[in-house]
Structure formats: structure tokens, C-alpha cells
């Protein structure tokens, strides 16, 4: 019953006569549509303008900068165009540690995404049914996500400190660690297990653990909401048919949750891939945690090399697009279902 | 497989999962609450007590002190760390960002949710595509532009950057809520003689208040917690540091005791957490639920 064209009910003038007049009744729908069109454009233009000026134009300029030899000192007198070159890109690709940084970024992103989504899934399953204090715990679990990253990174830094950190103190007391472990500044920690020796990238793993801890509430919220929308008759029917809890999870719940899990993985992957704060605050990008975003920052502030920073940022964005392209080519329909 | 063994397998799984569930719950409670308890605990003791017994999980009465808070909040002239000033800066930037973002996002969200104008599908996709680009990509040109305009160490410049970061997601959040407001309410307003602008101002905005609050709160949290751009633009000028930046810069040095900085973390965390939990209750009350029934 509310199918009138968008502009039909709009009356600018308080006059009792209907707009359009009796002379040309055939043109009224077109007028209404074009009026809605005009109103829509008028309403969207302020927002569009803001996005254009503060987001689209700067990004476009980054692309230009990446192809120019731009240092911050001489950028004052520089025009928008001129001196095109691919030097920045060849510098970026040839610079020491570019490929290893890309690899670190990938490990960091994949590990954090998988870990936070998995922990979120486990948490959602555990908090699915009501129990005493569930509301309280649910609220508390959002704390890591809500709290400022600087504050929580500082707490982790202090807690993991080899000198006055609680983790090392308890570790030496409970597990008999001989030496305090510098979690955030150890590139490779040697572990012997059953006579074999491994080097584990301790600082990188710690940063990944931090990331999982901080973002599992995000996954938890999404998955719990979806979990509560699963019709209970499905599970009841499966129970009647003799399915065990694990079978019910595997064959009933998991297929229902798959779209939201896929969506979460994409979202977290994009966000973590570009993440700067967490790694910078915890390790400063040292000890094998040199993710690409921290490198962009270093180019920009340590060397004032705007062109190289722009090129590096662009390479980062391009690699992300390629990865997402692959993803959507193979699993795209699942995400689209959910979105 | 007979019915009896299947039943017993189900029973075994039920038992194991029943125990496992409580273990998981205890684990989750520990990892989410302990770090924040630790933060609060360290902020209330002097540095000597921490160095003497780093593993202690409680606070003895003789150690208890609030001097850490006094130290961290006092202005630098009075020998403190000047967090009062940082708090003010953060509040100004965050509130300014919220107002500017909502002002920019509301018309766009309304248009995308209601009006079938030319290209309305593409616009909402464009707003979201912005998030594909890393913040660092935005950082480079904005850094240069602000250096050129002399805005590089001003809070206004920072607020503009935050608006850039939050407008797209705000449009998305508001749009999702606006489409749930029944169209017939708008038609009723139009029949009563409201123009489109009046309808938005007098009918849609009051109905969308929960969503406006939620979006505003989310934007506030992003702006309050943000670190990268504050670091890029304000690092050279301690007078305009935000709390996040101040804490990060001071924690790099060794001269400020860790327990004092822990008090700083508490001061940084409390406003966001408080706002979040205060609003969570408010947001659950739907405003439109009964509006269309009569």
C-alpha cells in the first residue's frame, strides 16, 4: 500500500491544489521521479563532497606522488604533475627487506584473522545458552575491542616485560623458566622438543596473539548474532534423529554460520593487512615484525621520502586487491549471500 | 551402529562438552578481565612495590596510593605529566569529529536509504570501497597537504582526518537503520504538509535518534582511540597531544615510572568504556517498534 512514487507525496507549497495541475495528467509520474532524483542528488551531494575532498582526492594524489621524485622539503614548490618516473617503485622493490616484510605481513594477517575468528567462534558457542552472569561476561568480553589500543598495548608491554612483567615472574615460579623471556624483542626463540630444536618467531607470535585477543570480540558479536537466528527446529530434528552434539555442530550449525564466518575473514583480513598501530606500539616493527604499514611510516617520517612512502603504500594496497580478487573469484558467492 | 551406542556417544559428548564449556568460559573471563584488572592494580601502587614483587596480583593496604593519578594529571609546569591537557585535547578532537561526521553523513545516509536517484547504488558502494585503501595511503597526502597549509600540528587538521576516516562507515550504519523506519510515517508527515527537509528534521531524525547516538558513539570511540594520525601530525608539539599519543610518547622513555603511566592508561580507557556501557543499554530500546502500529 505504500507504493506511491517517492516524490508523489511531496508538497512544497501549502496551496490546496494538487501539483502538476489538471492540464497534463500524463506527465505526473515522470515529474515525480525526476523530483526524487533531484532531491536525492541534493541530499547526497554534501556527503559526497566531503568524501571526495578528504578521501578520494588524497588517494588520487598518492597515486601521483608515487610516480614522482618527491621529498618533503622540496614538495612546497612542486607542481601536481611533472618528472614522471618509476624510480620509487624500483627503489621499493629493491630495498632491503621488502620481500621479507611482505611475507611477515602475510603471516601476521593470516594468523591474526584465523585466530580471532576461531576464538570468536568458540566464545560464541560457549555463550550460546543462558547461564548466570552471561550478560556480565558478554559485556566484559567486549573490553579488549573497545579499549584504546595504546592503553592495552602498554599493559601487554608491561606484563610481558623481562624485568618487571608479571608473565615472566609467574613463568619462572610455575614453570621454572631459567631466564626471563623477552617476548617482544626476540626474533627467534629456540625451543627443544623431543630432542629436536626449533626456532619460533616469538615476537611475531606475540603480536599475533595480541591481535587475536583484541579482535576476537568483533567476531564473537557477529557469530553470536547469527547463531541465535538459527531456527531451533533444525537442531531439535537432528537430535530426534540421533545426532550427537558434535555432529549437530558439524552438519547443522557450521553450514548456517559459514557465510558470516567467510565475511568476517574478509573484513578482518582487510583491516589487519593495513594495520599499523598494534605492531608499532608493541615492537616498533623490530624483531621480525616489520609489517608493511610500519615501513610506510618509516619512509615518511625517518627519511621524509614521500614518493617512496606513497609507492610502498600503493604496492600494499595493490597486493591486498590481488589477494581479495583471488578470494572473490573462488569463494565470492558465499560472502555475497551474507552481505 | 545400534541405538544404544549412539545414545551413549551422545551422552559422552554432552558430558565432555559440558565441562569444556565451563573451561572455555573461565578462560575467556580470565583473558578479558585480568589485563584490565592488572592495569587498575598497577595504577594504584608505587613503582617500588612493582619492582619488588612483579608477580603480585593483589594490593596490600600499605602500598595503596593515588599519587600516581595526581602525578599523571598535574600539568607539566607543576611537575606532573600534563594528562589533564591531553584529555581536553582528546575531548575537543573527538567531539568535533562526531559533530562534523554526523553533519556530513546524515543527508547522504537519508538519500541512499530513501531516494531513488541516479546512481544511488554506486554511491553506497563507493563509500564502502574507501575502506579497501589503507589508512597509510591516506596518511601520505594528508601529511603533505597539512604541512603545506601549516595545519600539520593543529587539532583542527586532525579532526578533519578523523572525519575522512569515519564518514563512510557512518553513512553505512545510519542507512541500515533508516531503511527500517516505515515509509508510511513519512507519507503521513507529507500529508500533514511537511516538506522533505521538514520531514527529515522533525520526523526522521527523532526516530533515528538511537542510531544517531550509536553512530556518534562509534565515531567518538574511533577518534578517541586513534593513534597513527595523531602521531604523524602532532608528535612535535606536546601542547596539543591527545591522550593516546601522550601515553605512547611517554612510555617510550624511561624517566616516567610505569605505574604513573598505568594511571594514564586508566584515565585513557575509562571514558570510552564508560560511554560504551552507558549507551549499550540505551541502544537496545527500539524507538520505532510501536510507531507504525496505530
Image: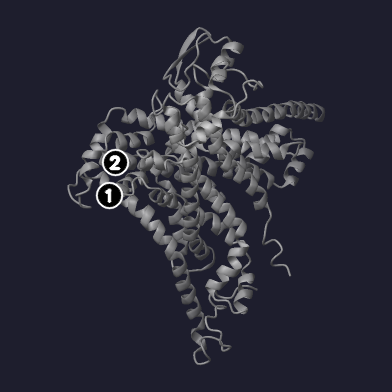
Mark 1 crowdedness (10 Å alpha carbons): few <14, some 14-19, many ≥20: some
Which part of the image, by quadrant, shows the N terminus of chain B?
top right
Mark 2 crowdedness (10 Å alpha carbons): few <14, some 14-19, many ≥20: many
Q: Quadrant of residue A91?
A: top left
Along the horizontal axis of the image, is B96 left or right of B213? left
> Residue tagged by mark 2?
A311
Expressed as whole percent of the image width and height from the top left, the position of residue A224 reads 65, 42
Q: Quadrant of residue A295?
A: top left
Outermost residue, right side: B4
For the residues carrying marks 2 and 1, which lies nearer the camera in this image? 1
Residue A233 can be seen in this image: yes
Outermost residue, left side: A83
Secondary structure at badge 2 equals: helix
Q: Are marks 2 and 1 in contact (CB under 8 Å)?
A: no
Along the horizontal axis of the image, is A269 left or right of A88? right
Residue B1 can be seen in this image: no
Chain of the residue that carries numbered disc 2 in the rendered image: A
Chain of the residue that carries numbered disc 1 in the rendered image: B
Which part of the image, by quadrant, shows the C terminus of chain B?
bottom right
Q: How many marks?
A: 2
Q: Using the image as rendered, state which of residue B166 and residue A152 is in the foreground.
A: A152
Q: Using the image as rendered, state which of residue B212 and residue A243 is in the foreground.
A: B212
Marks 2/1: CA–CA distance: 20 Å
Q: Is residue A77 above or below residue B17?
A: below
Along the horizontal axis of the image, is A239 left or right of B260? right
> Residue tagged by mark 1?
B148
Q: Quadrant of residue A71?
A: top left
Expressed as whole percent of the image width and height from the top left, the position of residue B189 reads 62, 74
Q: Using the image as rendered, state which of residue A108 and residue B38 is in the foreground.
A: B38
Along the horizontal axis of the image, is B28 left or right of B166? right
Expressed as whole percent of the image width and height from the top left, the position of residue A267 reads 50, 43
Amino acid at each position: 500500500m505504500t507504493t506511491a512514487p517517492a516524490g508523489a507525496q511531496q508538497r512544497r507549497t501549502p496551496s490546496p491544489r494538487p501539483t502538476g495541475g489538471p492540464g497534463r495528467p500524463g506527465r505526473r509520474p515522470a515529474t515525480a521521479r525526476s523530483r526524487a532524483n533531484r532531491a536525492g542528488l541534493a541530499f547526497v551531494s554534501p556527503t559526497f563532497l566531503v568524501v571526495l575532498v578528504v578521501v578520494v582526492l588524497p588517494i588520487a594524489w598518492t597515486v601521483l606522488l608515487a610516480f614522482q621524485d618527491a621529498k618533503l622539503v622540496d614538495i612546497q614548490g612542486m607542481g601536481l604533475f611533472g618528472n614522471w618516473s618509476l624510480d620509487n617503485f624500483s627503489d621499493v622493490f629493491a630495498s632491503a627487506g621488502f620481500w621479507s616484510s611482505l611475507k611477515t605481513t602475510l603471516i601476521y594477517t593470516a594468523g591474526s584473522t584465523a585466530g580471532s575468528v576461531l576464538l570468536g567462534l568458540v566464545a560464541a558457542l560457549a555463550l550460546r545458552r543462558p547461564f548466570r552472569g552471561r550478560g556480565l561476561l558478554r559485556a566484559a568480553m567486549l573490553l579488549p575491542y573497545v579499549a584504546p589500543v595504546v592503553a592495552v598495548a602498554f599493559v601487554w608491554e608491561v606484563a610481558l616485560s623481562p624485568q618487571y612483567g608479571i608473565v615472566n615472574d609467574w613463568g619462572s615460579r610455575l614453570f621454572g623458566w631459567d631466564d626471563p623471556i623477552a617476548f617482544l624483542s626476540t626474533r627467534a626463540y629456540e625451543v627443544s622438543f623431543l630432542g629436536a630444536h626449533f626456532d619460533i618467531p616469538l615476537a611475531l607470535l606475540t603480536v599475533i596473539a595480541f591481535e587475536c585477543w583484541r579482535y576476537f570480540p568483533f567476531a564473537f558479536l557477529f557469530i553470536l548474532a547469527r547463531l541465535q537466528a538459527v531456527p531451533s527446529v533444525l537442531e531439535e530434528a537432528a537430535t530426534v534423529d540421533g545426532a550427537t552434539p558434535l555432529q549437530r555442530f558439524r552438519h547443522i550449525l557450521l553450514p548456517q554460520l559459514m557465510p558470516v564466518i567467510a565475511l568476517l575473514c574478509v573484513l578482518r583480513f582487510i583491516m589487519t593487512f593495513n594495520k599499523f598501530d598494534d605492531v608499532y606500539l608493541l615492537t616498533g616493527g623490530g624483531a621480525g615484525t616489520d609489517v608493511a604499514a610500519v615501513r610506510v611510516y618509516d619512509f615518511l617520517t625517518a627519511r621524509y621520502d614521500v614518493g617512496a612512502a606513497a609507492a610502498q603504500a600503493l604496492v600494499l594496497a595493490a597486493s591486498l586487491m590481488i589477494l581479495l580478487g583471488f578470494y572473490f573469484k573462488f569463494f565470492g558467492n558465499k560472502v555475497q549471500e551474507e552481505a | 551402529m545400534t541405538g544404544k551406542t549412539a545414545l551413549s556417544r551422545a551422552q559422552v559428548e554432552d558430558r565432555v562438552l559440558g565441562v569444556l564449556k565451563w573451561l572455555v568460559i573461565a578462560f575467556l573471563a580470565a583473558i578479558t578481565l585480568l589485563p584490565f584488572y592488572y592495569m587498575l592494580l598497577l595504577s594504584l601502587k608505587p613503582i617500588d612495590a612493582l619492582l619488588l614483587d612483579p608477580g603480585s596480583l593483589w594490593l596490600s593496604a600499605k602500598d595503596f596510593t593515588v599519587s600516581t593519578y595526581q602525578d599523571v594529571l598535574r600539568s607539566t609546569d607543576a611537575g606532573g605529566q600534563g594528562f589533564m591537557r591531553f584529555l581536553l585535547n582528546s575531548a575537543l578532537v573527538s567531539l568535533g569529529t562526531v559533530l562534523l561526521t554526523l553533519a556530513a553523513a546524515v543527508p547522504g545516509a537519508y538519500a541512499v536509504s530513501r531516494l531513488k536517484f541516479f546512481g544511488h547504488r554506486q554511491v553506497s558502494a563507493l563509500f564502502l570501497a574507501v575502506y579497501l585503501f589503507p589508512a597509510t595511503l591516506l596518511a601520505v597526502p594528508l601529511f603533505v597537504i597539512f604541512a603545506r597549509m601549516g595545519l600539520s600540528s593543529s587539532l583542527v587538521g586532525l579532526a578533519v582526518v578523523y572525519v575522512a576516516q569515519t564518514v563512510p562507515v557512518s553513512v553505512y550504519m545510519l542507512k541500515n537503520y533508516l531503511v527500517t523506519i516505515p515509509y508510511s510515517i513519512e507519507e503521513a508527515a507529507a500529508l500533514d504538509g511537511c516538506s522533505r527537509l521538514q520531514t527529515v528534521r522533525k520526523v526522521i531524525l527523532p526516530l533515528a535518534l538511537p542510531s544517531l547516538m550509536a553512530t556518534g558513539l562509534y565515531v567518538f570511540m574511533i577518534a578517541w582511540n586513534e593513534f597513527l594520525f595523531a602521531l604523524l601530525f602532532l608528535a612535535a608539539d606536546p601542547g596539543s597531544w591527545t591522550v593516546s599519543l601522550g601515553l605512547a610518547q611517554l612510555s617510550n622513555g624511561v624517566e616516567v615510572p610505569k605505574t604513573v603511566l598505568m594511571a594514564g592508561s586508566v584515565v585513557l580507557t575509562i571514558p570510552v568504556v564508560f560511554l560504551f556501557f552507558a549507551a549499550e543499554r540505551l541502544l537496545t530500546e527500539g524507538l520505532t517498534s510501536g510507531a507504525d502500529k496505530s
